Amino acid sequence: MKIKAYLKPSCGWSNGVRAVLRKHGLAFEDIDIINQRANYAEMVQKSGQPLSPCVEVDGVMLADVSGEEVENYLLANELVQPAGQDAGVPLNAGCSDAEHAQMATKTVRFF
């Protein structure tokens, strides 16, 4: 399975996606959309929208998803089996105010 995850370096939803993929032992490409303008542009072009996280699984784009939604997709399509362990972080939580403030100082504005 080929997985490309378009994620922010530090974000509740992005961390939830990472946690789900690690929980199921899946190899994935962690693509930084904050510090690399070309990565963000690629995500928007492929997903058709500007919100993250986006996860591409074998050519299928899951746009603006939480870790919970990614896990549900993987389970529903029998790409993984249920895992009894906890992911270790919330799978459906946004960024904290502190994370937003930190990203605002580093974010490259595209529009």
Image (cartoon, rainbow, N blue to C red):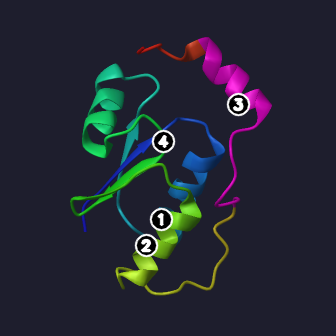
Earlier in the chain: of badge 1 and badge 3, it is 1
Which percent across, then down, holds residue 5? Answer: 38, 49
Is 75 rendered above or below residue 33? below
Element at badge 1? Answer: helix
Quarter occupied by the N terminus: bottom left
Q: Which mark is residue 52?
A: 4
Q: Are marks 4 and 2 in contact (CB under 8 Å)?
A: no
Q: Nearer the viewer, residue 68 or 16?
A: 68
Q: Are marks 4 and 1 in contact (CB under 8 Å)?
A: no
Q: Which mark is residue 87?
A: none
- Distance between mark 2 and mark 3 Cα atoms: 27 Å
Crowd rating for badge 4 (residues with CA inside 10 Å; few <14, some 14–19, many 20+): many
Q: Nearer the viewer, residue 9 or 91?
A: 91
Q: Are marks 1 and 3 in contact (CB under 8 Å)?
A: no
Give the residue at x 26% y 42%. Answer: 46
Q: The residue under label 4 is which amino acid type?
A: Ser
Which percent across, then down, holds residue 36? Answer: 37, 23
Residue placed under numbered mark 2 in the picture: 73
Is 38 rendered above or below residue 78? above
Give the residue at x 63% y 12%. Answer: 105
Q: The residue under label 1 is which amino acid type?
A: Val
Element at badge 3? Answer: helix
Q: Is residue 24 visible?
A: no
Earlier in the chain: of badge 3 and badge 4, it is 4
Which percent across, then down, holds residue 6? Answer: 40, 43
Element at badge 4? Answer: loop
Q: Which mark is residue 70?
A: 1
Q: Which mark is residue 99?
A: 3
Q: The residue under label 2 is which amino acid type?
A: Tyr
Residue farthest to the right?
97
Crowd rating for badge 3 (residues with CA inside 10 Å; few <14, some 14–19, many 20+): some
Earlier in the chain: of badge 2 and badge 3, it is 2
